[in-house]
Image (cartoon, grey):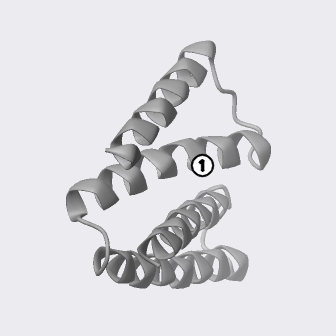
Amino acid sequence: MGEFFLALSIVFNSVANGFFKAAADIQGFPLRKGSLLAIGLLVGLANTLCYIKALEKIQVGIAFPVFSSASIVLIALISLLYFHEAISIQKWIGMAVIFFGLLIVWKS
């Protein structure tokens, strides 16, 4: 069950960062920017609660590296697909290294 909550935490973290980026792209502080920020904070809270639940079953020495590296890859993909940010070949290679490192850590 710890793996389930860790996966949810990774998704919530990545989605929260997407909301923060969308809020950052709005000039000034209109209602829409505040709404996106509030949603991002709520999703961030869900991230934290799921991560704490995951730590009940998974060692922090495994959970945090998996959380961090999987979040990097997922956030980069969100930035590519939703925000149309460019990802260079070096970044793709770096994400592949992170992904394979993630597999090694998870299987150890």
Q: Position of residue 41 (x, y in %)?
A: 50, 80
Q: Amino acid at mark 1?
A: Leu
| Picture residue at 74% right of the left edge, 46% below the top | 83
Question: What percent of the width, then of the height, locates residue 44?
Answer: 48, 76
Left/right of residue 10 with respect to residue 25 in the rendered view = left
Against 53, is 60 above or below? above
Q: In the picture, residue 103 is in which quadrant?
A: top left
Read off the residue under disc 1: 74
Judged from the image, the secondary structure of the residue bearing numbered disc 1 is helix
Q: Is residue 91 above or below residue 7?
A: above
Q: Relative to 84, does residue 20 appear above or below in the rendering?
A: below
Where the C terminus falls, by quadrant?
Answer: top left
- Residue drawn at x 40%, y 33% is 101
Judging depth in this view, the residue of 95 and 6 nearest the camera is: 6
Q: Is residue 4 above or below residue 101?
A: below
Q: In which quadrant of the rendered view does residue 51 lie?
A: bottom left
